[in-house]
Image (cartoon, rainbow, N blue to C red):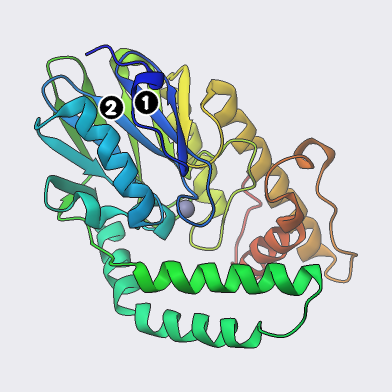
Amino acid sequence: MAATCSSLPKSPFFKLVAAGEGIWAAVATDFPAAVGNSAIVDLGGRWLVVDTFMSARAATDLHEVVRSLAGDEPLWVVNTHSHMDHVGGNEVFAAAATIAATGATRDRVLETAAGLPQRIAAAEAAAADATAGDDEESVRRRREAGARLDSLRRLRLVAPDATIGERLTLYGQRRRADLIALGTAHTNGDLAIHLPDDRTLLAGDVVVNHTLPVVQDGDAVQWLGVLARLRVLGAATVLPGHGEVGDAATIDDMDDCLGALLAAADALVRDPGAPAPLVPERFRAWRGAQRWPELVALVASRKAHTPFDAGVR
Ligand SMILES: [Zn+2]
């Protein structure tokens, strides 16, 4: 089916970008309804949706696009990892699709679902605290606290109902998709989707484009090993978990960023009294660049507690 992006339903939450014949990236354009990217892949007689955004609102628009393309053909949803901006819209697809992920991701989504009442209570307290002040910063904080509370109250988290061990391959009439469990990188249960016939990789948040990585739920050192595995696949097109569609160099950028982060963390471990590290020039224009000192401190605190660290990059 040859559908151009312009003939597909539009959404305020994401833009569709053709990343090959029958492959669409749904690049998030809204915070907090979408946040992470999704994608749609026509396998031929069956369809694959990768990640479901943060909210049912954004996922409903994605579902509409999928239905306009796929009609009633069988549908698989894959969650690349457990973060809410990648699984938050699962409920929209639950009736029509098998939702697959690693076992670690399923466990984590179930944990998050169980902890939702506490998170809502904390968000209610934060929203109550943010009521004072008419200056720009107070108004912004109030708006953000309200939006966060609203999105948490609407959330009905649905966990994946199929788990993948090392690998699962889906065969369609048009192409195949290899779902590859990556172990620990951005989280403890990352999964990538490789489309070998198209030299295309859907990497979840293991590769983000011109965006600083989130490291608190994963491990920066193991992450570098995972990137080396991904590079060997030889993908020419890389759909990242955040940011625009990239290419092989996007994996190299991620590798360089994590390497710089680990080096800065090493320096901080050696000299804990040093001033807060500045974000290197190369990453200064990346999304989330202001988080650099916080990321370095986080990685350094883990390194300081890891004996026999051979300074692996
Ligand atoms: Zn994530």
Q: Nearer the viewer, residue 217 or 56?
A: 56
Q: Report which residue position mark 2 lands on.
A: 41
Q: Is residue 138 visible?
A: yes
> What is the CA distance from the residue labelled 1 to the residue labelled 2?
6 Å
**If the image is split into quadrants, where does the N terminus sit?**
top left
Q: Dot 1 lies on which element?
A: strand
Q: Dot 2 lies on which element?
A: strand
Up-down: is 128 above or below 64? below
Q: Earlier in the sequence, mark 1 or mark 2?
A: 1
Q: Position of residue 203 (x, y in %)?
A: 42, 36
Is residue 109 toward the left or the right of residue 99 in the image? right
Q: Position of residue 33 (x, y in %)?
A: 46, 55
Is residue 281 toward the left or the right of residue 163 in the image? right
**If the image is split into quadrants, where does the C terminus sit?**
top right
Up-down: is 89 above or below 168? below
Q: Is mark 1 within 8 Å of ligand 1?
A: no
Q: Report which residue position mark 1 lands on.
A: 24
Residue 57 is tagged as none
Instruction: Please name the residue shown 58% across and 73% down the image.
Output: 145
Instruction: Name the kind of residue labelled 1 in the image.
Output: Trp
Q: Is residue 305 visible?
A: no
Furthest toward the front, the residue is 134
Up-down: is 230 above or below 13? above
Is residue 28 toward the left or the right of residue 188 in the image? right
Instruction: Please name the residue shown 21% across and 17% down the image.
Output: 175
Q: Determine whether label 1 and label 2 are within 8 Å by CB.
A: yes
Instruction: Please name the residue shown 51% across and 57% down the image.
Output: 32
Q: Nearer the viewer, residue 98 or 124?
A: 124
Q: How many tags in the picture?
A: 2
Q: Quadrant of residue 118?
A: bottom left
Mark 1 burial class by Cα count in 10 Å: few <14, some 14-19, many 20+: many
Q: Quadrant of residue 24?
A: top left
